[in-house]
Amino acid sequence: MNFDEAHVIATVAEIFRGDHTGVLVGIGDDAAVVKTSPLSVITTDMAVEGTHFNLEWSGAFDIGRKVTAANLADIYAMGATPQYLVVALTLTGSETMEWISDLAQGIAHEAKSCGVIVVGGDLTRGVIKVISITAIGEVEKPITRSGAQRGDSIYVTSLPGWSAAGLSVIQKDTLDDLEAYAVEEFCAPNVDYSAARALADSGATAMCDVSDSLITQAEQMALASGLGFKFFKEAFTASPEFIALEELANKEGVDVWQWIFAGGEDHVFLATGVDLPGLGVGEVVSGSGVTGLEMKKAPETWRHFN
Amino acid sequence: MNFDEAHVIATVAEIFRGDHTGVLVGIGDDAAVVKTSPLSVITTDMAVEGTHFNLEWSGAFDIGRKVTAANLADIYAMGATPQYLVVALTLTGSETMEWISDLAQGIAHEAKSCGVIVVGGDLTRGVIKVISITAIGEVEKPITRSGAQRGDSIYVTSLPGWSAAGLSVIQKDTLDDLEAYAVEEFCAPNVDYSAARALADSGATAMCDVSDSLITQAEQMALASGLGFKFFKEAFTASPEFIALEELANKEGVDVWQWIFAGGEDHVFLATGVDLPGLGVGEVVSGSGVTGLEMKKAPETWRHFN
């Protein structure tokens, strides 16, 4: 043990401290007390060492950012605004205080970028590191996965695939600029939360965060809406990022559509509606299921649990 | 792998399903949408295999009950009423569906005993099992740890120590009735949530859940309130449970006060105030710190992180 529990809690609590008019009781009591709106949105997302992150590849700051982003993206995907986080940490006891501080700084950094504050947590010990975050937000009119209407267009806020590309090249000894960008997106994606806000404000009928893969999430949204999702593969090539991603895929000898359609963890937002901001990539049709996301070989979709 | 992710999620979601007028969107979207009151209470508590539970000692149902109880007790300790839970699970992939179902049943059982429903979660994989729960509740007038007043009496809702006693005898081959009761309390304590409610309704000035140890929690409450906590050791012997616990301690050759003062995880409630229901065990005095909780040897307080 390099540290004691009270010291870790005090250090982390100091990093999480901040001003927020909604917080009546913050870290340090049995529970936090916060102001909430009549409708709240709640989500939880856990990152496990060896599954979601790897100490060889990612620094503590990025690990903190990434798991926080996964939670915040889920809140924005409901058309909601995040307000508060609680953070449960399992540490092994072999961490340095610097590593723990960096992790907390990463969480606080991503949270503050959305005006969100950490109001509570739990610290415990185990043989691997685990970070479990729960985010709470406010919403007036939730946007679920089930609201897609026949005739709606389908949009993504940007081109998915960079995180999968990063995972593909991360073990190389030297990285060129494109590879380095992909690795950064894998280690801690820069989520465009404002794009989700813009979709909600523009009247998106259904929305979700592409945390697994476009194929998986589109199937879930089509099923929930009781309609079919028809994608136009060529539409993705209109993204200003497509040429770069394709160049990287060619260099790696990978089908770029494998990254775009089956990659995960980019936290791009997928939405349906009429005249929405973003890249139009398909339409909602009668029937069921997803078409147009075919690849050269069977998809290897991103799954944490396989 | 004995199962696939979708099957596990579907099975667990079915066990968690229930009627609750506050839930607009439950399990299955990016986040849950629930009705909340103007003031909400939020807490998180994680249980880690090898630290909080051990598969040799505890069945999945009890593990589920115990981590849920830890969260619910924290909500009640604020004078609040729990409403919703989100549950993040790390499984190793070697579990049977029966074990997973039992875990979910234990969580649902404890939640339903308080009128609480699971509205969301996350499922992932790791080399050990981890259960991380966040509870959200409603409160009108929060009771913090800092509200104790000089002259208040100090109360516990029942005698702490049974969980520590259970841990002490759990490795025996055969258990008598008293030992079996203690082991049950260790594996999944029967928390008297209504006692916390009664303390809140009777005007408790400060309250907390004794999840660590009476010594630790009393010190925290005294510090937060800026006063001293003076305990009367003899007052604990008035508990109807004292004779049984002392008998077990004598048999084990343990100082019973070690269990009562330094044991953890009973989730007894500690409160201050005037004429409260419960066992009066001390008074709030000028000064600082805690007196009256002395044992024959230095306390070995329950810590998850040492």
Image (tube, coloured by chain):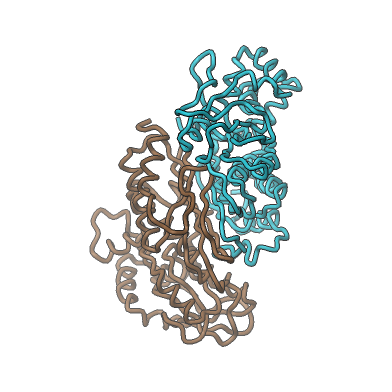
Chain colours: A brown, B cyan
Left or right of residue A200: residue B109: right
Direction front: furthest residue: B151
Tell me where residue A244 appears, x and y as whole percent.
30, 73
Residue B32 position in % (x across, y down): 59, 63
Q: What x and y, as percent, mark residue B207?
A: 58, 39
Q: Position of residue B221 (x, y in %)?
A: 51, 35
Quadrant where the C terminus of chain B sits is top left
Q: Residue at 35% of width from left, 64% of height from top?
A: A190
Frontmost residue, B148 versus B56: B148
Q: Is residue B4 above or below residue A272?
A: above
Q: Residue at x 52, y 31 (%)?
A: B218
* Residue at the far right in the pictured view: B177
Image height check: is B72 above or below A201?
Answer: above
Q: Is residue B244 visible?
A: yes
* Residue sitting at x 51%, y 84%: A153
Quarter residue A117 falls in: bottom left
